[in-house]
């Protein structure tokens, strides 16, 4: 049985969804789903404080990336004690996890010399491939096939339900101060959900945009889903957004970016269903009924 350390909340969720949580011996401080992840040893911590404003966090992140290459610290003594055979990490985004190069360098010094696996999805199909990769490493390939089949069926259900419906212009912001328009898998999910992206970077990194671009995007629906933040934490940024959009009056929704939009794991299909319910009033009851105001809430 392989001993696995996950440095990604999404990879942790994949392990639990595949039923290999007994092989998971260590996780990050951000791995909080499902509940079983909370019982695993934590081997990272963040240098950012939760009391900082979004603007202050953005400035801290930029400064840390310039000087140390990461905003996270890795407990090397604990990692060595856990004696992993496999470390799951990524080099897609240095803001989201410990630097890949740093992890690889440190892993080479461990007694077990674990294999460092880069999970770097940019699309929904890439996420399914990540599930397959983890399953193959753990020797449970058949479980991946079953899991992915179920997820694909839910995706196709969305496609069939939105076929022929009007496609509202949609803007998803992954950060507000300063504004970052969505990238990677999110624009794809908007399209599958029957929306038209007003300003996005499909299968590419999210990036900062000007407020003039936000105003000129003519978005009918704006979804604020900030990376790493839940609904309650984002309330202060909603006021910032509303003060900057001028006379534009789109529908504004706030979603749990931490749990759904920022994690390329099995629950990305939950994210698709959330977006579908937000974009189409006639489908709202069916697609949003399983979520609470801690997951998604309409502001205006």
Image: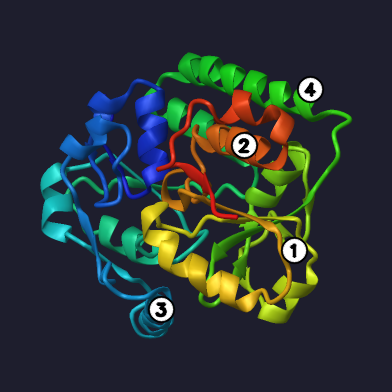
Q: Earlier in the sequence, mark 1 or mark 3?
A: 3
**Residue occupied by mark 4:** 160
Residue named by callout 1: 199
Q: Which one is in front, 100 or 232?
A: 232
Q: Earlier in the sequence, mark 2 or mark 4?
A: 4
In the image, which is nearer the foreground, mark 1 or mark 3? 1
Structural distance between the alpha carbons of marks 2 and 1:
18 Å
The Cα atoms of the two marked residues, 2 and 3, are separated by 31 Å
Vertical comparison of 203 with 285: above or below: below
Q: Residues within 10 Å of mark 3 (few under 14, many from 20)?
A: some
**How far apart in space, not on screen, are marks 1 and 4 (Cα)?**
25 Å
Residue that badge 3 annotates: 65
Asked where in the image residue 174 lies, by quadrant, the reply is bottom right
Which numbered tag is attached to residue 152? none
Is residue 45 something that shows in the picture?
A: yes
Reading the image, the residue beneath label 2 is 272
């Amino acid at each position: 049985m392989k001993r696995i350390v996950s440095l990604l909340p999404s990879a942790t969720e994949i392990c639990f969804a595949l039923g290999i949580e007994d092989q998971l011996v260590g996780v990050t401080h951000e791995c909080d789903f499902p509940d079983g992840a909370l019982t695993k040893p934590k081997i990272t911590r963040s240098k950012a404080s939760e009391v900082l404003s979004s603007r202050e966090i953005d400035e801290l992140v930029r400064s840390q990336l310039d000087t140390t290459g990461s905003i996270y610290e890795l407990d090397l003594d604990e990692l060595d004690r856990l004696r992993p055979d496999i470390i799951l990490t990524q080099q897609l985004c240095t803001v989201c996890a410990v630097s890949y190069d740093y992890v690889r360098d440190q892993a080479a010094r461990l007694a077990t010399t674990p294999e460092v696996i880069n999970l770097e999805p940019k699309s929904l199909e890439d996420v399914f491939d990540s599930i397959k990769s983890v399953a193959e490493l753990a020797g449970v390939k058949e479980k991946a096939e079953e899991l992915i089949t179920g997820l694909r069926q839910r995706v196709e259900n969305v496609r069939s339900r939105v076929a022929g419906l009007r496609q509202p212009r949609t803007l998803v912001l992954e950060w507000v101060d300063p504004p970052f328009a969505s990238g990677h898998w999110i624009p794809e999910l908007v399209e599958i959900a029957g929306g038209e992206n007003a300003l996005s970077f499909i299968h590419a990194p999210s990036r900062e945009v000007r407020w003039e671009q936000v105003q000129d995007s003519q978005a009918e629906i704006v979804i604020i889903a900030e990376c790493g933040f839940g609904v309650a934490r984002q309330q202060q940024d909603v006021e910032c957004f509303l003060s900057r959009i001028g006379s534009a009056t789109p529908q504004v929704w706030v979603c749990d970016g931490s749990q759904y939009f920022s994690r390329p794991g099995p629950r990305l299909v939950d994210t698709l269903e959330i977006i579908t319910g937000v974009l189409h009033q006639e489908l709202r009851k069916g697609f949003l009924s399983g979520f609470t105001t801690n997951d998604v809430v309409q502001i205006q």
